Image (tube, rainbow, N blue to C red):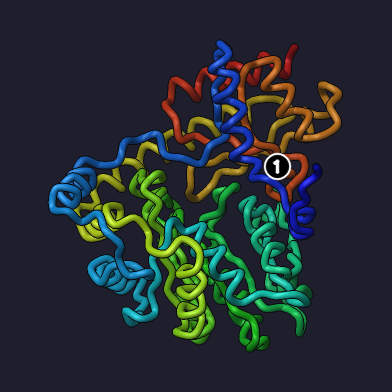
Amino acid sequence: MSLSVSKRMAAIKPSPTGAVLALATELRAAGRDVISLGAGEPDFDTPNHIRQAAHAAIDAGDTRYTPVDGTAELKTAIQQKFLRENQLDYEISQILVSSGAKQCLFNLCLAVLGPGDEAVIPAPYWVSYPDMVRLAGAQPVILSAGIEEDFKITPEQLNAALSNRTRLLIMNSPSNPTGASYSERELQALGAVLERYPDVLIVADDIYEHIHWAKQPFVSFAAACPALFERTVTTNGVSKAYAMTGWRIGYAAGPHSIISAMKTIQSQSTSNPCSVSQKAAVVALSGDQSCVVRMTAAYKKRHDYIVAALNEIEGIECRPGEGTFYAFPRVTGILEKIGLGSDTDLVEHLLNAADLACVPGSAFGAAGYIRLSFACSMETLEESINRIKRAVSA
């Protein structure tokens, strides 16, 4: 008997980053000394004061259902965080807490997109954006910006891509996979274009907000473009900045009607996020932030090392990033040097010849690049560079 799946499954594929992580785990279990630079996950433990808040919540019996959109305590902490750090003033009813920022984005796509709609996505992009759009029945419109453009789209590109079918623009700054960050002036230039298209909603994915070291401070889209505040949904979470990936807490804030629709979708899918994780997230957002400063300083040190080391390898070009914990080098010179046809071929070669796992740039809409996570120790990074050198010189 053959059991069929829905037609929508033909348009989407499993997450490439998840596939790399699973493969590296499988090969390690088989006895191979595989280094994985594929996962977008901090290598630090969740800070102790946050863990202690979770222990206290369990001991207090805070292990039951909460409101679908999150506890009042956490939503208040998020409200205060937005006001304190981003100068964005939201009402409590404009805030939704989900099981990770990814769920916020998925809820949003289902809430605002449908057949015939388009969503504009700058590339390189996080791997899940286009498939979320497709699952909602809409069509992703990809705007490409390579290393020469600092991986950032221009107002002219955006204006050419927008149409009466455009319903959503997805912005991610600092960017996964490139580490590129838009300045306030660059966001304002994009915002000036969007003011001419009143039916377009903007979602600002700020998940790497605190892992940021550009000379200009981080600015969220709605803060840079206050005229578009009522058309912007800002998403964030505790996963990256606080090393809380497994705790699964993300949040979004935006127009009442959009947040309400997202809440309805969540009520019929996952319902509330984890009660214990919400208690921990309150402490993460409201407590001592020195842990974030220490972790970000470590990421910056690793960034400086790996960017310089990659640029010393003939055939590799790596642009310095302004944040995140990824390097996104162009490898077309290496492909020509050793006779490989694509970035996927190079990723397979590095895994087979050097026991090094990374992700092809084509998974992010940027063929000819690879993504390397430096959320690991300096010793691991140094060994990774040595393995790359051996693999491409063999």
Question: Residue 72 appears at what percent x and percent y?
Answer: 25, 72
**Residue 218, can we see it?**
no
Q: Which residue is mark 1?
A: 361
Q: Is residue 333 left or right of residue 235?
A: right
User: Relative to the observer, which residue lies in front, 257 or 293?
Assistant: 257
Give residue 116's quadrant in the image: bottom right
Give residue 26's quadrant in the image: top right
The N terminus is located in which quarter?
top right
User: Relative to the observer, which residue lies in front, 368 or 105?
Assistant: 105
At a point 78% along the width and 51% down the height, the residue shown is 4
Examine the rendered structure and indicate whether residue 84 appears above or below residue 328.
Answer: below
Question: Residue 308 appears at what percent x and percent y?
Answer: 55, 31
Examine the rendered structure and indicate whether residue 192 appears above or below residue 389.
Answer: below
At a point 53% along the width and 71% down the height, the residue shown is 185
At a point 73% along the width and 48% down the height, the residue shown is 366
Q: Amino acid at mark 1?
A: Gly
